[in-house]
Image (cartoon, rainbow, N blue to C red):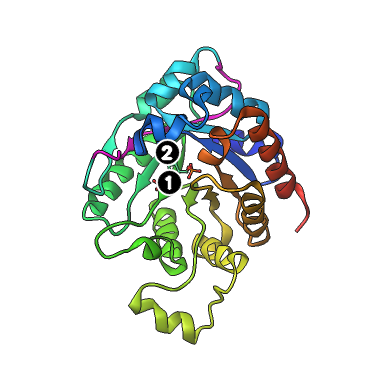
């Protein structure tokens, strides 16, 4: 029922497509890098209002952000409690658990959100933490959203988003029992030496974003799990809409866009989000 709430909410409700606003960048990148481009975004209420006014499917944030708006915006939009976080003052690729299933239930959330860093020295601990939290969340009827972001000593910046690695990370999130899997848009080329031959021999097409998205969706149980793609650093509206078109054409379930939404002035953000929603409403 909670997963259905997310899928049925907002202007894309009932289409199987989603646009979600994630605001955990205060942890990940710090407040100034996140919110100084649009100071209204320092206020947690701003993000609830933005997500509600834009007609999005859900709003995802860490404990303090959800607590600051839970009473005012109760029932107005499905929320996803981000229960672990990293920060830019650390040199390790690890995450702290910063929220609980009890918090999510107390705050009326529809889901918990959890990040794993496949390839990090701490990946197995993160997967084990997720196993415990996901089991508890599911037994309480909450959906589980997994941010699967490869990073660690064996991956350079290109490797982190290479499409074989992205598909691998997305598949691991599916294996860990995620209902919704969130990855970065997959890029060329294939990175893992062990994968290069099979990608070449099997002619797995990675020549354009739509093909790469299709491969990631296939890796998530052939489309039996929901897959959404993050927006990344601030970029032009057309570039973001092109990405959404490729995600839609490749069978992805939508976008989870933070900085590209809340770092713009609100009227611009609402216009951009409305255009994204239109992309996901078109027939493919
Ligand atoms: P953005 O649209 O701002 O990229 O948000 C998506 C997200 O996954 C956030 O939830 C998270 O804070 C951020 O990206 C992490 O980005 P990075 O890995 O580039 O630091």
User: For the point 41% across and 26% down, which residue is it?
Assistant: 104
Residue where numbered disc 1 is placed: 146
Dot 2 surroundings within 10 Å: few (below 14), some, or many (20 or more)?
A: many
Residue 146 point in image, percent of width and height: 43, 46
Look at the numbered disc 1 and give the secondary structure of its residue.
strand
| In magenta segment, residue 98 | no
Q: Quadrant of residue 55?
A: top right
Quadrant where the C terminus lies?
bottom right
Quadrant where the N terminus lies?
top right
Residue 55 appears anywhere in the view: no
Task: Pick whichever, 263 or 95, lies toward us.
Answer: 263
The answer to whether the beta carbon of the residue marked 2 is less than 8 Å from any atom of ligand 1 is no
User: For the point 58% across and 20% down, which residue is it?
Assistant: 75
Q: Quadrant of residue 265?
A: top right
Q: Is residue 261 left or right of residue 102?
A: right
Find out whether the residues at labels 2 and 1 contact each other: C-beta distance under 8 Å: yes
Q: Is residue 234 left or right of residue 121?
A: right
Q: Which is the main secondary structure of the residues drawn in magenta?
A: loop
Residue 123 appears anywhere in the view: yes
Look at the numbered disc 2 and give the secondary structure of its residue.
strand
Q: Is residue 53 left or right of residue 34?
A: right
Task: Pick whichever, 109 or 60, lies toward us.
Answer: 60
Residue where numbered disc 2 is placed: 113
From mark 2 to mark 1, how far is it between C-alphas?
A: 6 Å
Outermost residue on the top side: it is 72
- Up the image or down, 213 lies above or below 41; here it is below
């Amino acid at each position: 029922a909670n997963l259905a709430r997310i899928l049925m909410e907002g202007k894309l409700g009932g289409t199987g497509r989603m646009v979600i606003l994630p605001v955990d960048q205060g942890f990940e990148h710090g407040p100034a890098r996140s919110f100084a481009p649009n100071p209204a975004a320092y206020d947690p209420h701003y993000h609830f209002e933005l997500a509600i006014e834009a007609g999005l499917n859900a709003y995802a944030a860490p404990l303090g952000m959800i607590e600051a708006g839970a009473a005012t915006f109760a029932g107005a939009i499905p929320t996803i409690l981000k229960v672990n976080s990293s920060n830019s003052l650390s040199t390790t690729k690890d995450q702290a658990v910063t929220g609980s299933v009890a918090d999510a239930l107390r705050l009326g959330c529809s889901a918990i959100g959890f990040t794993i860093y496949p390839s990090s020295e701490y990946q197995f601990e993160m997967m084990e933490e997720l196993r415990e939290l996901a089991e508890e969340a599911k037994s309480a009827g909450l959906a589980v959203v997994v941010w699967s972001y490869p990073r660690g000593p064996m991956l350079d910046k290109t490797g982190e988003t290479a499409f074989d690695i992205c598909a691998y990370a997305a598949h691991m999130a599916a294996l860990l029992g995620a209902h919704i899997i969130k990855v970065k848009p997959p890029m060329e080329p294939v990175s893992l030496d062990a994968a290069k031959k099979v990608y070449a021999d099997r002619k797995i097409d990675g020549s354009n974003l739509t093909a790469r998205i299709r491969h990631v969706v296939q890796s998530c149980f052939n489309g039996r799990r929901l897959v959404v793609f993050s927006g990344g650093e601030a970029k032009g509206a057309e570039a973001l809409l092109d990405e959404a078109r490729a995600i839609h054409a490749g069978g992805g379930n939508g976008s989870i866009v933070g900085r590209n939404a809340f770092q713009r002035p609100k009227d611009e953000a609402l216009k951009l989000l409305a255009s994204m929603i239109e992309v996901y409403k078109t027939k493919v």
